[in-house]
Image: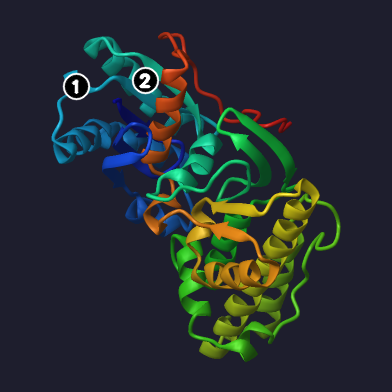
């Protein structure tokens, strides 16, 4: 039996979690910064790291208390080392180092994207290996072949913006608030089939390989907003719904087409969709339909585990610790890092 404390601070959300045997979540606390960044329509790195400094110890304390365990009962401490915002990463990493030194516990560095992929297995009935992993978040969009958490091969990735990043930028242009992905999803849900087909936005690289591109779609949405704005610079409520629904449908078309191609090229029949965009209600609905038509298995993590959290970091750290992989206090953070051949 093992008990691992995970700490995640790669961007704006700050998480701490206790996970037993790499699977059972005893506690998962996430301190969010929505109110900090909402006035700016996106994450301000300096404000994110300052907020982490203020709340990191309290978040870890709450996680230990909720799990009903003491630090002396923890077998190892896992922490995100990258990729992400370097200032935010350093807050979590430095705190984890100090905690590991004080408690005399092993320190384990974890790649953030390995954590997202592991989130698909934090269920009672986890997805079996091998599977295709679609990582769709505010900072990353990529497809991987996952034979194990230690054997991950890159299949394709975005050439420019990440899918979640474009959701945030579209929301900001529409004045919908932050986080943008959640707001676009909410507004799009007000429409039906006619709204989803109202605007023929482009589907970039739809029939070309497994790489992704969303910058052209982002520009197309911005131009459509400008075209529809009235003399006062405002959109009608109907146009706002049409834009959100049509944009969301375009992203979904690309993700489904690439998922189908990834499964076909690998010969696999299992797909895990992870990351913040995996919480999108319309994408989940459409993926369920795709799975039924194609005779494949599509799995999503619980919504609470789609966005950044420390349970997924603890799950990966548990496996690494069991393999004897532990770091010393020279462990460093990085804003970018390869995963599965990524360059």
Q: Which residue is mark 1?
A: 73
Query: Which residue appears at 68% of the width and 51% of the height?
Result: 161
- Residue drawn at 59 percent across, 78 percent down: 245
Give the quarter of the image for residue 203.
bottom right
Q: Position of residue 31 (x, y in %)?
A: 30, 45
- The circle on residue 119 is none
Q: Residue furthest right?
A: 208
294 in relation to 151, above or below: below
Picture layout, residue 174 above or below residue 260: below
Give the left or right position of residue 23, taking residue 150 as reference: left
Say which of marks 1 and 2 sits in front.
Answer: 1
Residue nearer the viewer, 20 or 303 = 20
In this view, the residue in front, 37 or 96, is 96
Quadrant for the C terminus, please: top right
Q: Residue at x 41, y 34 (%)?
A: 315
Which image quarter holds the N terminus? top left
Most foreground residue, 87 or 26? 26
Q: Position of residue 238 (x, y in %)?
A: 55, 90
Q: Which residue was labeled with disc 2?
A: 94
Image quadrant where residue 144 sits: top right
Q: Element at badge 2?
A: helix
Q: Secondary structure at mark 1?
A: helix
Residue 124 in the image: state x and y as whole percent.
Answer: 37, 49
The correct choice, above or below, for 298 with respect to 36 in the image is below
Horizontal and vertical percent position of residue 98: 29, 15
Can residue 142 be seen from the camera position used here?
A: yes
């Amino acid at each position: 039996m093992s008990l691992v404390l995970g700490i995640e601070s790669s961007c704006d959300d700050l998480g701490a979690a206790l996970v037993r045997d790499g699977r059972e979540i005893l506690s998962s606390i996430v301190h969010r910064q929505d109110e900090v960044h909402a006035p700016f329509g996106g994450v301000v790195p300096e404000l994110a790291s300052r907020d982490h400094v203020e709340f990191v110890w309290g978040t870890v304390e709450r996680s230990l208390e909720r799990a009903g365990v003491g630090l002396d009962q923890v077998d190892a401490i896992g922490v995100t080392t990258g990729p992400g915002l370097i200032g935010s990463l350093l807050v979590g990493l430095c705190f984890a180092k100090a905690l590991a030194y004080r408690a005399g516990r092993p320190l384990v560095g974890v790649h953030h994207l390995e954590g997202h992929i592991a989130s698909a297995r934090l269920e009672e009935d986890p997805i079996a290996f091998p599977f295709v992993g679609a990582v769709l978040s505010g900072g990353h969009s990529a497809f991987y072949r996952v034979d194990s958490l230690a054997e991950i091969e890159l299949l394709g990735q975005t050439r420019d913006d990440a899918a979640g990043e474009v959701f945030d930028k579209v929301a900001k242009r529409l004045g919908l608030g932050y986080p943008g992905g959640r707001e676009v999803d909410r507004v799009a849900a007000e429409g039906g089939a006619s709204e989803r087909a109202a605007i023929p936005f482009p589907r970039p690289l739809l029939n070309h390989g497994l790489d992704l591109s969303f910058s052209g779609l982002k520009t197309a949405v911005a131009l459509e907003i400008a075209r529809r704005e009235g003399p006062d610079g405002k959109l009608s409520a109907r146009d706002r719904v049409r834009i959100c629904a049509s944009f969301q449908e375009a992203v979904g078309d690309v993700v489904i087409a690439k998922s189908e191609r990834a499964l076909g090229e690998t010969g696999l029949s299992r797909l895990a969709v992870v990351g913040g965009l995996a919480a999108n209600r319309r994408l989940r609905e459409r993926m369920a339909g795709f799975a039924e038509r194609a005779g494949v298995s599509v799995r999503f993590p619980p919504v609470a585990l789609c966005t950044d959290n420390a349970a997924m970091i603890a799950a990966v750290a548990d496996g690494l610790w069991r393999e004897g992989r532990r770091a010393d206090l020279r462990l460093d953070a990085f804003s970018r890092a390869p995963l599965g051949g990524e360059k």
